[in-house]
Image: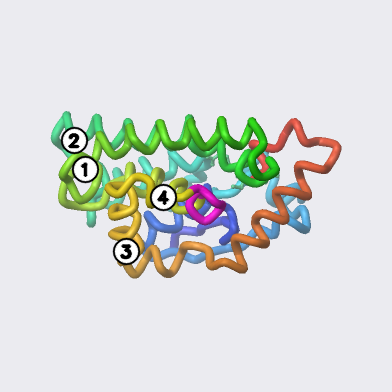
Amino acid sequence: MLQFYYNPLSPLSRRVWIALLEKEIPFTSITVNLKEGEQFKREFLAINPFHHVPVIIDDGLRVLESLAILDYLDCKYPQNPLLPKDPSQLAKVKMAQMVANNELSALVILLISEVEDSPQLKKAKRKITRILNFLAELLADDAYFGGKTLSLGDIVAGNAVILVGKLGYDLSQIKQIERWRDRLMQRQVWQQTQPNDEQVAIFKHTVQEIIQSPGKNQIISKI
Ligand SMILES: N[C@@H](CCC(=O)N[C@@H](CS)C(=O)NCC(=O)O)C(=O)O
């Protein structure tokens, strides 16, 4: 059976966790305790030399990098497809996925590290607004980025958007995004995988500890 190395508080693990559940792929999960440094142990470094979760091992194939895993899962397991065939819908899904991955995810750190009303926090929130307006434009009148059904764009962007909402960005400013977030949260899989307030507080605390640690320039790769 497919093995899934993850940590439930890791936002990047959550992408893969949601895809596995939405696609109804049987798997066994192995929790890697990042706080205890299990990712640096020899056994795990043999699985991922870059000491990150998520990783999957499927039929003897090891796949790391969350976006690579998502593409692999959708290609290998045809049920409940998460990538549309239509070229323009596929373009929208991939744009949502890449904009969330490349523009939005990095701002999570600033929401945690910056004090209220600091110029950096205000700038980060302005950039989040710009990103969310772009995503709202992509969604247009559709329920999801790929049209009527959930896609990898929704999984990657949805995870990041829900997290920034929980970290103090007011999503009600952009109604379309707020409704889409609510639509995602109505799904049983999302209710099962999204962190509750206590888990968000632990996540924040962990990130703050890393920020204060000597290797803080590695911060982006550690959450
Ligand atoms: N580019 C990788 C990044 C994975 C990543 O940074 N994972 C974090 C958790 S969200 C991690 O394992 N951090 C522990 C560490 O770097 O030591 C991906 O998308 O899978």
Which of disc 1 and disc 3 is earlier in sequence?
A: 3
Residue beneath the point at 17% across and 46% down: 142
Which of disc 3 and disc 2 is earlier in sequence?
A: 3
Q: Are marks 2 and 1 in contact (CB under 8 Å)?
A: yes
Q: Residues within 10 Å of mark 1 (few under 14, many from 20)?
A: many
Side of 133 relative to 121 (left or right): left
Dividing the picture into quarters, in which one does residue 70 lie?
top left
Please tell me whether residue 201 is drawn above or below residue 102 in the rendered image: below
Task: Say what amino acid the circle numbered 3 marks.
Answer: Glu
Residue 46 visible somewhere in the drawing = no
Q: Residues within 10 Å of mark 2 (few under 14, many from 20)?
A: some
- Comparing labels 3 and 1, the label whose residue is closer to the camera: 1
Residue identified by numbered label 4: 171
Q: Are marks 4 and 1 in contact (CB under 8 Å)?
A: no
Residue identified by numbered label 1: 146
Residue beneath the point at 78% across and 58% down: 36
Which of disc 4 and disc 2 is earlier in sequence?
A: 2
189 in magenta: no
Q: What span is in magenta? A: 164-169
Residue identified by numbered label 3: 24
Q: Position of residue 79 (x, y in %)?
A: 23, 56
Residue identified by numbered label 2: 89
Task: Give ligand 1's quarter of the image.
Answer: top right
